[in-house]
Image: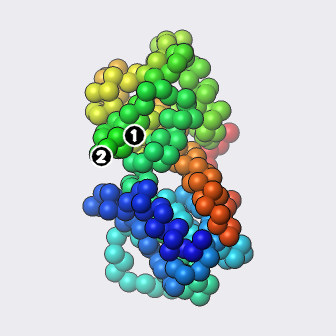
């Protein structure tokens, strides 16, 4: 399949026009690969390490969740990461494409994959946007789990380096309704409360957001940005593999960007 056809297929599923106005979905760098047979390296974040991996794998497309360019750069200077990514992309003829907030909304996107991993039933978006799609997912655990068992399930499924959750006096309380949203989802706490979820799995939560959740009787669970979004990248590879591409692989050089002392 040619790169142009791959992008057409993807955009029919997750239209970049659906992205937020602060976002930058779609082509980040297109050096002339549209008519080439697609050799795709899928990653969460396009970094120099991922670029070197693409070069060594003879890939011609880095398909990333996070955009390489969020805001228009005011300059391109040697020694800067963005400049080096662009230089290498053109030298080695490697395109960089981003699917961000459009990918967050769709079935089999970032939130939907989390819901599937927790085996949630009767799932619906936390914030609907269109035709059954939207940000986050909320659904039922059948059977219900204790909070301790839910945390253990999240740890086993996502393998985050640290799992942070709201202070609670009872790890044995039964949890039946759970909301999930991959990446930075603390801004959706009010919307989650309206869904009557008992627990909310997301990432990048601040001190006072844990306080807010406790005060609103919502158990906030922070598994980290990388751990909550990387599974959807793996799912994307699986979907691409069904398209008979010349080559597709999940990046092994994606980084969490954080380390924790044992």
Dot 2 or dot 1: first in sequence order is 2
Q: Which residue is mark 2?
A: 130
Q: CA distance from mark 2 to mark 1?
A: 13 Å
Where does the image place residue 53, in percent across and percent down from the top left?
68, 70
Residue at x 60%, y 71% (from the top left corner): 1
Residue 63 figure quarter: bottom right
Depth check: give the residue in front, 111 or 203: 111
Where does the image place residue 126, in percent across and percent down from the top left?
34, 36
Residue 187 figure quarter: top left
The number of callouts visible is 2
Residue 88 figure quarter: bottom right
Mark sitting on residue 136: 1
Depth check: give the residue in front, 246 or 148: 246
In the image: residue 22, left or right of residue 38: left
Look at the image and tell me in which quarter the C terminus lies. top right
Mark sitting on residue 17: none
When the figure is inspected, residue 236 is found, relative to residue 157, above or below; the finding is: below
In the image: residue 249, left or right of residue 99: right
């Amino acid at each position: 399949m040619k790169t142009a056809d791959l992008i057409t297929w993807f955009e029919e599923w997750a239209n970049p026009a659906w992205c937020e106005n602060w976002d930058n979905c779609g082509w980040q760098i297109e050096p002339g690969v549209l008519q080439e047979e697609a050799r795709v390296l899928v990653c969460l974040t396009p970094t120099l390490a991922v670029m070197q991996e693409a070069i060594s794998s003879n890939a011609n497309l880095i398909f990333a969740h996070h955009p390489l360019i969020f805001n228009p750069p005011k300059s391109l200077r040697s020694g800067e990461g963005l400049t080096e990514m662009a230089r290498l992309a053109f030298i080695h003829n490697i395109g960089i494409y981003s699917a961000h907030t459009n990918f967050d909304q769709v079935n089999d996107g970032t939130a939907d994959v989390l819901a599937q991993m927790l085996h949630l039933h009767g799932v619906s978006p936390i914030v609907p946007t269109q035709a059954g799609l939207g940000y986050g997912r909320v659904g039922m655990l059948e059977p219900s789990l204790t909070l301790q068992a839910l945390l253990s399930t999240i740890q086993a499924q996502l393998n985050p380096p640290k799992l942070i959750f709201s202070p609670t006096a009872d790890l044995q309380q039964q949890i039946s309704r759970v909301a999930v949203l991959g990446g930075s989802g603390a801004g959706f706490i009010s919307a989650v409360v309206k869904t009557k979820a008992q627990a909310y799995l997301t990432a990048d939560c601040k001190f006072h957001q844990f306080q807010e959740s406790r005060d609103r009787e919502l158990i906030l669970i922070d598994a980290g940005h990388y751990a909550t979004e990387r599974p959807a990248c793996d799912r994307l590879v699986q979907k691409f593999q069904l398209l008979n591409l010349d080559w597709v692989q999940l990046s092994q050089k994606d980084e969490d960007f954080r380390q924790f002392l044992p």
